[in-house]
Image (tube, helix red, strand yellow):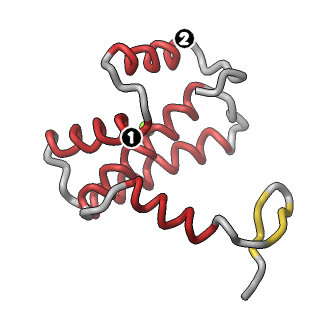
Amino acid sequence: MKEDRDYGAEQTELAEGEYRMGITTTDELVQAVEEWGREKRIDNPIMQFAKLNEEVGEIAHELTRGRIHSAEIVDAIGDTAVTLIILADILGTDLHYCLGQAWWQIKDRTGHTENGSFVKDNG
Ligand SMILES: [Mg+2]
């Protein structure tokens, strides 16, 4: 959690709960989410994709109302990450691998930033 943002007591309690459970790294959190998804027998990629979009919609809901530093947006981003982690697991891959592939593709990309958004060079 970013120290310069106040997302409320509930979010702080949740983060502290993770530490109490001995989960201290992102990799451990991803693994816990994968195990949770398997325990719950979540195995339908189309339904999981629908849930992912539902959670992305919740991010949009908060952003379009200007609530960019709220506990609700933290919740929406977290739920989006959970649904994405489980979707990757259902499809036989994992977040670390997919993120690594994306990183190696973008890390040397050239371009410029317009209105706070990166526009890659053509070619
Ligand atoms: Mg949600």
Instruction: Quadrant for residue 97, please give it.
Output: bottom left
> Which residue in the protein does label 2 denote?
9
Name the residue: 39% across, 40% down.
Answer: 27
Left or right: 32 in relation to 108: left
> Which residue in the protein does label 1 denote?
27
Name the residue: 32% across, 56% down.
Answer: 87
Q: Is mark 1 within 8 Å of ligand 1?
A: no
Residue 24 is situated, as x and y percent measured from the top left of the image, at 41, 26
Residue 45 is situated, as x and y percent measured from the top left of the image, at 26, 62
Q: In the picture, which quadrant includes the N terminus? A: top right
Crowd tier of the residue under label 1, counting other residues whose Cα lies within 10 Å: few below 14, some 14–19, many 20 or above: few
Q: The residue tagged with tag 1: helix, strand or loop?
A: helix
Instruction: Quadrant for residue 71, please give it.
Output: top right
Seen from the viewer's position, the closer of residues 28 and 14 is 28
Name the residue: 46% across, 20% down.
Answer: 15
Instruction: Quadrant for residue 123, please give it.
Output: bottom right
What amino acid type should be assigned to the residue bearing mark 1?
Answer: Asp
Ligand 1 quadrant assignment? top left
Residue 44 is situated, as x and y percent measured from the top left of the image, at 21, 59
Q: Disc 1 vs disc 2: which is toward the camera?
A: 1
Mark 1 or mark 2: which comes first in sequence?
A: 2
